[in-house]
Image (cartoon, grey):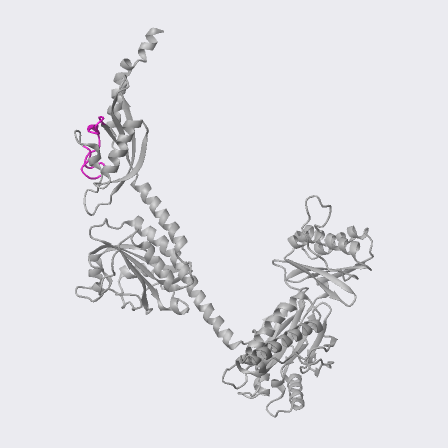
Amino acid sequence: MSGQADAFSDSALLPHFLAVSRALLARQDVGLVITDSDLRVLRSNVGPGTFGGQGVAPGSLFPEFFEPQDAPAMTLRLREVLDTGSVLSVELFAPASGPSERPRALSLTAARLEAEDGRIIGLVVELKDVSEQRRSRDRLALLHQAADRIGTLLDAHRTAQDLADLLVPPLGDFASVYLVEAVFSGNEAPELAGVGGHHLECAAVRATGPWPSGMITPGERLPPLPNVPHVINVLRGNAIVTNAREQIQLYGEGSPLGPLLIPPGGDSALVAPLFARGLALGSVVVWRKQNEPPFDRKDAQLLFEIASRAALSLDNARRFTREHRAAVTLQRSLLPLPSAQITAAQTAGIYRPARSTAGVGGDWFDVVPLPSLRVAFVVGDVVGHGLHAAVTMGRLRAAVRTIAPLDLPPDEVLMQLDDLVQGLAADAEAAASEGTDIGSDGTGATCLYAVYDPLTRRCAIAGAGHPPPALVRPHGTADFIELDPGPPLGVGGMPFPVTEIEVEPTSTLALYTDGMVGQPHGDIGTGMERLKSALTHECRPECNLPEEADRLVKQLSDPAPEDDVTLLLARTRTVLDENTATWEFPRDPKIVPAARSVTSGQLGAWGLEDLTFTTELVVSELVTNAIRYAVGPVRLRLTRDRILVCEVSDGSNTQPRLCRARSTDEGGRGLFLVAQLTTRWGCRYGPRGKTIWTEQPLQGVPGGISR
């Protein structure tokens, strides 16, 4: 046993310890330095070429290896290791061997050496080159900063400046951003596969000091660049590394482009394109001074990634500018919505403002899709012309868009608008009494509101002082629908009777304002007869509806009318019988399985087996609620179109409420499940009860509409 113990003694292992020391000192990838207690180097494998600089020579003081500004702090920290015995791990930079060399990032680990008797005899220091890891971290940090700082505002100038500010000084000493003019105007940017005639403008610059005089500044247009492979390479989406000498050769000796684009003392440069969504938005250029390390391909890749992110933000700003400009234009003009193609109808609308200085008026039309494939057609006319009437029109259109999805009958919708107009009139009177003009002449209005159901082929119409609509049947006969007219909006206290008619498929409803029939002779009766005659002779099921609407307006109104002219044509459609199924059940809990069964069978017949489980659950919950809380028989209807519509009707007017049941509740989850399993749901009321409806999307299933 004593022999084995002697074999593991320090004296016996001394040759091994020496061998380990020699092996470590012989390594080229890891630096090893041994010092005495005064930090004087005893042994070192760090030569002049190991980490750059002068190396660590035996006999020198180890802190002399570091940068002069770091040496005092490192001396204190190394002496702390000697005093406390703690292990020091730190990252620092080694001196560069030359002005154009990049400083090396080193990982330093120092531990105290002790003799057998406990005396402190020095330090052992390990040095590792972690420059690549440090650069990777710095690049990643810069990318994170780019994500946080660039694109916070939808403004091209601000985004370009944020990009330049980000790049200086972390990546270079000078940065400039150039953008095509379309980015600022919101127009479509070019798709540059080569050099074209697209003008670039300097959008932002940044330097570590003042921006050099004589160089291009923000707002100035970049002169045309030579059509050479170097430029084409950037325009095709590649980041390049270049230098001042190459740029001067590119521009030509004595060219004014040199002083304009190359900073004084600039040596190495990066150029990256600003490409987003296939569009060339510009480029970004970064320069380093002569005493800085030159750029390499990794720097180019970093700038390319930052530029790609910035380009998306710039394109978002461009798009926002375009949309904002369009929104401002629409807001000023307040033109009606364009033509629409929906399940219930094909529509085409024409609006022509009266001859006025504002170029806008108070007429409007709208087409509002409603639940269960129904649609609302709206035409209105605000008293007066110009900005005040247009503002009131905009308020009424917004109100209709808000009220219509509530599934109120046409008369109740008009009552809501009537209250709104009365409120606007009261506000105008109050403002006038205080000497403020907010347009008291634009608070009266007429309106026609119609709801068409393509399943029942019925249309419910109510009017508020508005001319009656015309109906063109499929065989070509046109007639005006006889309405019991209500008062204009704003009168108050009067009902708006509803007229309900049956509409054949491919019939055309014509809704209009008095400007359509009151010109050019001013006799509305004569104008209505002219409209009826034109519809009879020209409005056919096969005609192009937008073209027909445009032709009717040109034929029946002046090119510069004295009153606003509005015409809305709606060619009705219907859902084919094979795409809808209806069942009626007694109010008995036993019919719930039967409702699920007919639902499953109908979905299978339609090839919608994927929706069977979800729809069965929806039907089960709705039918169960109808049996539990409603009165009378329960009616179930399924409709297949571009969506699957499920409707359950009963004789109760009880308002269904969506609630969130607690974990201990035994019920209260039915409508919550329905809401989660469908895209939307709702409830509408009729003369004899209510209908709860749900909608589920279909993919790849053609709609069941008939022309």
Residue extent of the magenta highlight: 35-56
Task: Name the foreground residue: 195 vs 393.
Answer: 393
Find residue 20 and report its image quarter. Answer: top left
Task: Name the foreground residue: 219 vs 117.
Answer: 117
Task: Name the foreground residue: 447 vs 607.
Answer: 447
Q: Residue furthest front?
A: 434
Q: Main secondary structure of the magenta part?
A: loop
Q: Classify residue 391 as left or right of residue 108.
A: right
Viewer can see residue 479: yes
Q: Quadrant of the N terminus?
A: top left
Magenta stretch contains residue 82: no
Q: In this picture, is 520 found above or below 165?
A: below
Task: Name the foreground residue: 575 vs 636.
Answer: 636
Residue plotted at (25% across, 57% down): 209
Question: Picture coordinates of residue 87 (x, y %)?
Answer: 32, 30
Question: Picture coordinates of residue 519 (x, y %)?
Answer: 60, 89
Residue plotted at (73% across, 77% down): 495
Q: In this picture, is 398 found above or below 207?
A: below
Magenta stretch contains residue 55: yes
Q: Classify residue 651 as left or right of residue 148.
A: right
Q: Residue furthest bottom?
A: 521
